[in-house]
Amino acid sequence: MTTRRFRPPAQFALVICLLLTGCKMVDSQNPLVAPEKAMLDLRLVGAWTAHDSKQPDSIVYVHVGTAGNGFPDGMMRAVWIEHSAVRFELRQFFFLARTIGDRTYLSIVLPKDEKTPETWNPADVGTWLFAQADVSESKVSLRFTPVPKAFEKAASASAAKFGQSPSNKYGYELNGTTDEIARVFAAAGPELFDGKHPMVLSRLRPPEDPAR
């Protein structure tokens, strides 16, 4: 069995690329909410599981909770465990959640280097990766693929700038202040992210108590 103890969150975008069609995402130099003003989304807390259709013998477990350890109170941590007959991998990443209207978005930290941050330092952030989270009691559907025309239309009415990423590392970038970026998301409606190929996480239920 191949064992990889840990994969830094900077490589999480590569994991997403493997699971999604098209592998186009949108990142920014600023998050959708200031870390010190973010609030925990308790709907996301808990244990989840997902299956990768490209690797039917592999199963993924994701545990979501508070970041803790000196991070802002509203920052969340996800620990990702992938296990199969031939491989075991452990990854973790940090993110902020913000609900605008009836839609929830995530700002995922991608650090500047391959070192996983032990505590919070804004200087360690390389970029923020955006995603939409459609949350129900039993499932979370994560949308990462942007709809460029929707972003362009919403950004045109604000001071934020949307376009092809110069490095083309993630596909597109949306830059501006946190408030300007929030106005783009608020003005755009539900069509910012393509819902055709979401990553779907299913909540793991605790076992029933046999005595009950």
Image: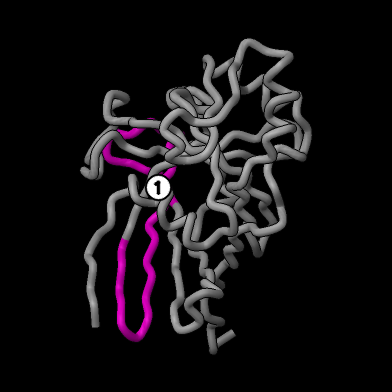
The residue at the point 39 percent across, 61 percent down is: 80
- Please state the extent of the stretch shown in magenta in the rendering: 65-90
Question: Image quadrant for the C terminus?
Answer: bottom right
For residue 180, above or below residue 162: above
Callout 1: 10 Å neighbours few (<14), some, many (20+)?
Answer: some
The residue positioned 37% from the left and 76% from the top of the image is 83
Q: Looking at the image, which is closer to me, 145 or 58?
A: 145
**Residue 26, image x, y percentages:** 54, 36
**Disc 1, SS:** strand
Which residue in the rendered view is the most extreme toward the top? 159
Q: Does the segment drawn in magenta span residue 84?
A: yes
Query: Left or right: 179 with respect to 183?
Result: left
Residue, x 56% and y 82% (percent of image)?
A: 208
| Residue tagged 1 | 77
Q: Residue 54's spot in the image, x, y percent?
A: 51, 74
At label 1, the amino acid type is Arg
The N terminus lies in quadrant: bottom left
Residue 98 vs residue 91: left or right? right
Q: Is 100 placed above or below 210 here?
A: above
Image quarter for residue 100? Answer: top right
Counting from the top left corner in percent of width and height, residue 132 is at 63, 44
